[in-house]
Image (cartoon, helix red, strand yellow):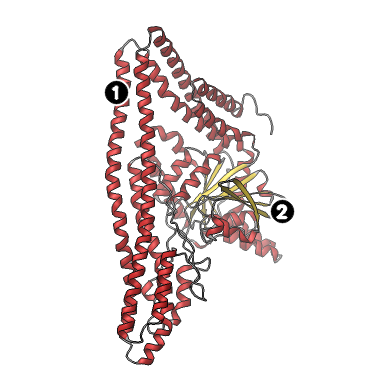
Amino acid sequence: MTTPDPTGPVARLLRYANEVHALAGQCGRQDLAEVLAACAGRWKDECTDIVVAGAQKRGKSRLLNTLVGHPDLLPVDADVATNCFLSLRRGPRLAAVVHRSTDSGPLQTPITIESIPDYASMRGDAGKRRDVVSVDITLDNPLLDGLRLLDTPGVDSLTVGHRQVTVAMLQRADALLFALSAQDQPVLRHELEFLAEAAERVQAIVFVLTKVEDSTNWRNLQEENKSRLRTFVTEAIAADPARAATLAPLLEAPWIPVSAKLAEAAEAKRREGREERANTLRARSGMDALERHLRAFAEGRESARGATVVAAALSVLGSLTTSAKDDVAAGSDDDGDVAARLAEVDADLAALAELSARRRAGMVANTFIGREVGGIVGARVAEIRQPYENTIATLKKQAQIDQYMAELPVSVQRSLEAAWSQIVYDVERLARTTLDAFARDLGLDPVELTADRQAMPNLSQVQVKGDMAAEAPESVDIIRDVLPSASIGLSLGGFATALLGPVGFILVAPAIGAAIFMGRRSMEKVQRSQAAIRGALRDQFAVVTREMTLDLERMVATWRVSVEQAADDTLARRRRELETRRAELKSASARSAADRLKARKSGQERIAAIGTLTTRGHELRKELAGAVAALGTEQPVPAGT
């Protein structure tokens, strides 16, 4: 790495970070010094980390596959798995390594390229996904020289941990590519909120509008996205002017429209020897413009990385200000100064008490989640059962009854397994909405909720394939598309594929699986009459309804305890910090005059130093923002179709 110009912004940034680090140490805040050291510790890393983020189905993975020239490398039909990210970097050959975090420590396992979806996709194997932190993929592509591309979970995923993982990845990001699609709805509120959070950590941000090949209206959609972003930023700055320094640059971030589909078509034409047509398609794809931007990030990584260091330093300085002001107040000749600081602490404690009261009220409201589980299960199971009842009523001849009974046990089993998928989704959505609102009301980060699903034993010779990842089932009318009527057998294969997709196996809790299995066995032995069949059917559905309800009530209770415990821990920690601060203020005011004068002088010196460093930090941030904005400029706009 070349030595930076001693008068340039990079050298000044490094000196600045050292000064803030030293000040944190002098103030006895080694914890804050370590935060800054960790951020600046990546300075010698000559690989630029570019995080690729966005909502699900925005075209992130296909975009990355196209950039590195491997259309089937990353799974494009499902989101990246919870707690996992995929890393693409240059290496001598195409290879993949899974990194796990286990009780015994980190574990690395080489895997085949073909098995990447099993470990990194929400449609993959649940057992293989367990404890996976990342999948590191190497390939020999010149684009990745000095670059590391990081594919992250969707920021809108129902699994809250997805967004948390992506935000955490921004701590190590030098740049962010944020994907939006020309074929989907405009940028949504939760995406804008993520961008605001990202802008606190990353200064080099580029918007990539994907899938422009099939959209004749992509320019209008891009303008609407810009308008929504402008409105959001304007309102956020009006509410908190201090955010202007981080949010305003979002309005200057470049937009690059691209088409992975056109780029793939260009490569196909090139393989056919049709160079002119290939070049035309490639130019229209916008990929060359995006690649130039990526290369610019690699070449200008010091400017992009410097913005992250400045943001960390300013955060550290903000945390140091409170204790310095307390020391100045404690050393004042005016007792009112200490009283004013104590009044602030008391006000914060009172606000904390109010939060605790809201926490208790919220806890009561949370209990109703469990009560609603029974209603959700009952409604879904009734939806499944009624068509069977209707069909049984039409069976008049013994031959019809015999034929129907030959297929009924397996059909009921399949229907209940499919219903379980929808029921878990409904319950997870209800719990997540309620508990997230509870956390937000207390000013807490969302707590990840993950259903404790276990693989159901093989209950028949025919496996029903599907996926129980925490995402919405496909849009299927259960009554119309799933349940059989007079001819049960004809519907089985079709519904399994339509509802549940081609990968994995349905997951059902053991107790529910046993109830379904025993119900099927009982039904196979039932007397062949309408009344007996109807009674056996009711018994089967009643038992399974009870087991499903119990299992989900336990699941919801576990989630509630997790979220409420996190709330208690956070509120208790805040209370300890405030009570410690109050005790220190009271103790300081009782010191000798000489000690109080010394503390006051130290506090004033620290406030002055913090003020000077804060001003320098904002100036550096502005200078670096200009350098970042100049990276990768002058991209042509693809023609689209």
Residue 419 placement (x, y as % from top left): 39, 68
Of the numbered discs 1 and 2, the one sitting upstream in the chain is 2
Q: Is residue 639 left or right of residue 371?
A: right
- Give the residue pinned by disc 1: 343
Q: Nearer the viewer, residue 577 or 520?
A: 520
Q: Is residue 259 visible?
A: no
Query: What amino acid type is highlighted by mark number 1?
Result: Ala
Circle 2 SS class? loop
Q: Nearer the viewer, residue 294 or 275?
A: 294
Q: Is residue 36 visible?
A: yes
- Give the residue pinned by disc 2: 93
Q: Nearer the viewer, residue 435 or 169?
A: 435
Residue 433 placement (x, y as % from top left): 35, 52
Q: Quadrant of residue 486?
A: bottom left
Q: Is residue 18 left or right of residue 232?
A: right
Report the residue at 29% width, 18% height from top. 339
Image quarter (top left, top right, bottom left or bottom right) of the N terminus? top right
Q: Nearer the viewer, residue 503 or 222?
A: 503
Report the residue at 43% width, 82% height from top. 407
- Mark 2 neighbour class, 10 Å CA radius: few under 14, some 14 to 19, many 20 or more: few
Q: Is residue 102 shown above or below 485?
A: above
Q: How many labels sit on residues?
A: 2
Q: Is residue 92 shown above or below 476?
A: above
Residue 638 placement (x, y as % from top left): 56, 55
Query: What amino acid type is highlighted by mark number 2?
Result: Arg
Q: Are marks 1 and 2 in contact (CB under 8 Å)?
A: no
Q: Quadrant of residue 233?
A: top left
Q: Cα distance, mark 1 to mark 2? A: 64 Å
